[in-house]
Image (cartoon, grey):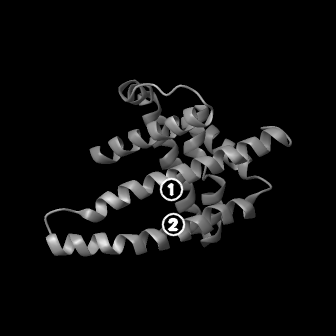
Amino acid sequence: AIAYFISLWFSITFIKVIDMRYNEKEVSKPKELISSTKHLLLPTVIVSILTALAVFGGLILLIIPGFIFSIWFAFSVYAVVLDEKKDTDAMRFSKNLVKGRWWAVLWRILLPTLIFFVVSGTLQMPFDYLSELYRTFEFSSLFVTYAMGLQIDRQFMMYLNHLILIMAGNGIR
């Protein structure tokens, strides 16, 4: 459980760093960055739990609502981290970003994710082989850790793209 929170905290910090770089802001020292994102940890956990409950509840209903909810709330964590929205406000914000673009968002999430898993699975095979061969070091963990950073970066860029589209179009509700 502690590893999950530490990993989440570093993911939040990583998202903030990408945002700073994207907006051409000066990136602080790592210790300052990690410290400055501490207040986002609990709201991120709460929104993650609420999103998971909504998606799980939708899956229980008839499966299809779960898929709809997962796309609607795909940007909830980013709304917490980047816009400091809380609880259901973050979920509502995410849904508004997706509104009118559900199919486009679905394919922008689904296709790269499928490609990511196929490519990472293929590239991970040699690391799995080395792990089996030498059994003293988990080579595949190194690859997965690096690859997940790439996944976060892709999702962040999607969030910004949709936010810009909404702001340029009909405004944020």
Query: Spatial distance from mark 2 to mark 1, Cα to Cα?
Result: 8 Å
Residue placed under numbered mark 1 in the picture? 151
Label 2 environment density (alpha carbons within 10 Å; few <14, some 14–19, many ≥20): some
Q: Which mark is on residue 132?
A: none
- Tell me which label, 2 or 1, sits earlier in the chain: 2
Label 1 environment density (alpha carbons within 10 Å; few <14, some 14–19, many ≥20): few
Q: Are marks 2 and 1 in contact (CB under 8 Å)?
A: yes
Horizontal side, residue 103 vs residue 128: left or right: right
Horizontal side, residue 17 vs residue 4: left or right: right
Above or below residue 29? Residue 1 is below
Residue placed under numbered mark 2 in the picture? 116
SS type, badge 1 = helix
Q: Quadrant of residue 147?
A: bottom left
Q: Residue at x 70, y 47 (%)?
A: 161
User: In the rendering, at what x and y percent does residue 148 appear?
Assistant: 44, 56
Judge by depth and name the residue closer to the eye, 106 or 28.
28
Q: Quadrant of residue 122?
A: bottom left
Q: Residue at x 60, y 39 (%)?
A: 79
SS type, badge 2 = helix
